[in-house]
Image (cartoon, coloured by chain):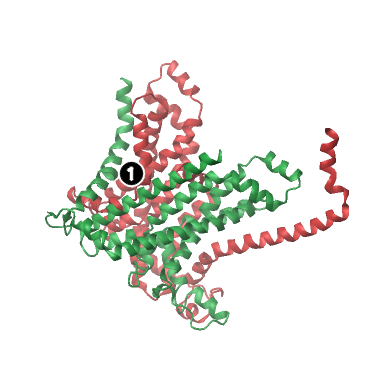
Amino acid sequence: MSELATDRRTTPNLSAGEGSKKSYWSKLGYGLLYLILSIFAVIQIYPLIWLVFFSLKNNQEVFGMSPFSLPQDPQWGNYVKVWTQGNIGVYFFNSVWMTVLSVFLTVILASFVTFAITRMHWKLSGLVLGLFMVGYMIPLHSTLIPLFNFYNTVGLIDNPLSIILSQTTFNLPLTIMILLGFYKAFPREIEEAAVMDGCSVHRIFFQVTLPMTIPVLSTTAIINMIYNWNEFVFVNTFISSDQWKTLTVGINNFVGQYLTDWGAIGATLVISIVPILLTFLFLSNKIVEGMAAGSVKG
Amino acid sequence: MSNKYIITLYTLPALLLLLVLIYVPIALSGYYGLMDWTGIGQMQFIGLENYANLMKDEKFWASAGHSFLLGIFSVLSLLLYLAVSLVLVSKIKGSDFFRKIYLIPMLLSSVAIAQLWLKIFDPSNGMLNKLLEMFGVENTPVWLADPNTALYAIFVPIVWQYAGFYILIYYAALKNVPEEIIEAARIDGATPLQIALKIKLPMISAVFKVTIMLSLVGSLKYFDLIYVMTGGGPNGASEVMASYMYKEAFELNNFGYASAVGFGLLVICLAMTWLTSRLTKSNDNVQY
């Protein structure tokens, strides 16, 4: 028995000549694989590099020269121009505070629900969870006209509250899904011990459960942040005045004004994606984790 | 303080939002579909007229056809993503780095992606046509301005955007295939290709089915990118269900009819979700 095992394991080493030939082919094979992966990486990243290039060019350079040429004389003025001429600063600030508020609300409300569903026994918990899960399947466009009419009736059209409420609600199902996996896998002993010690449910939630779930809370917060920062339809539909527009919608209208000024358009787009890229640079592991967790559960 | 009180306190805020902002609106969408309504004035009940018109509205069915076409493309592109993921897990150094590079487009807003690709597809100064000219291609296509190419051109940024997302999912699933099984196959003399196709692929079939559903149903809801890039044009060549609804409502003020379109979109999405989940489930039963 053991003889057979050793025999099998050593077989490849016996024929030394074949082994070296094999390593030559496997080296070539790996080289080919790296080539494929690298080409794919270039396709994924080069459009963005090109964007940065043309944001620093003037029109003569964009129109006259190769798309692969570096900016001859970087036109930093493009950035100054778009930041000072339009409302980008306002849009930027709106995106920040609306995103922060929506993320906070989603994460705390979803934590409440997940806590009630996984840590308490009640008849309707399955139904409530089901409502949230089905909510994930509903296309938001089907709700758009009734929502528009609703906000119009209650005076929330062109009011940032309509954006915060909508973003919070539509991100609840995914957030609960991610939290649920974590809560279920997490031992309940600590919370049970706190009950024994006579802690109230509120204290357990705020002082035991929430601190324990910080890793998954940060994951969901980052995923929510990206979704809210990039959200387009709600802002485009419910907000009409410049003072409440977010960066995503603001730049879309703004870019339209420039029509043929490629440098200005490029600079605007770069400004809008830099915060997301910076977040990714520092928190890529968290983002990868959140994206994977959210999808596979669906 | 009873448990019931706490459960209500903890679930009610989120539940109220869910009901008021998602469930009530979808019911209302079906109801508004029964109305003649411009959005501002009084609604007038007209029975099933909007729904009857929807059934024979060629523009709607053309846009539904485009949505399904995008769905089929998206599912086919999953094979490409899967192939890349299989390469990534085959003991490649720097696979982590590649995975993260691939994911970057997924993090950008659809508006930024749309604006960027509008420039890439620009007929005279865009990166794509300049590249083609460098290779000596004359009469370069006008891409988004040509009804014959617009929808296919739009599909390119969609593949670009979602590649990293699906590769991430497949990579995670492939990493979960037990190392002992792969090792056993290797000892038995299986080539890396055999291991990939005959062992790794079947072991992640459940995940693959989930992604089919995600990409198919997701495609039916495409809106942002198309709305910004072509607005459904030229001449309806890239119109999809959501953009058709949006145009009817917020540009033509046919809120009643648009509500019927929105309700149709909902029914089609839920039906496809149900159908794909059923199909994938029955397959599972056969397998095990």
Instruction: Please tell me whether residue B9 is drawn above or below residue B286 in the rendered image.
Output: above
The answer to which quarter of the image holds residue B247 is: bottom left
The residue tagged 1 is: A169
B213 left or right of A109 in image: right
Q: Nearer the viewer, residue B62 or A158?
A: B62
* Amino acid type at mark 1: Thr
Disc 1 crowd, CA 10 A, few/some/many (<14, 14-19, 20+): many
Colour assignment, chain B: green
Query: Which chain gets the red colouring?
Result: A
Element marked by disc 1: helix
Residue A86 visible here = no
Count up the numbered dots.
1
Furthest-front residue in this view: B286
Instruction: Please tell me whether residue A178 is drawn above or below residue B228 in the rendered image.
Output: above
Picture residue at 48% right of the left edge, 35% below the top: A181
Picture residue at 40% right of the left edge, 28% below the top: A205
Q: Nearer the viewer, residue B255 or B18?
A: B255
Picture residue at 62% right of the left edge, 42% below the top: B177
Instruction: Please tell me whether residue B138 is drawn above or below residue A206 in the rendered image.
Output: below
Instruction: Please tell me whether residue B54 is drawn above or below residue A62 in the rendered image.
Output: above
Picture residue at 39% right of the left edge, 62% below the top: B225
B212 left or right of A41 in image: left
Q: Position of residue A199 (x, y in %)?
A: 40, 19
Q: Position of residue A296 (x, y in %)?
A: 49, 44
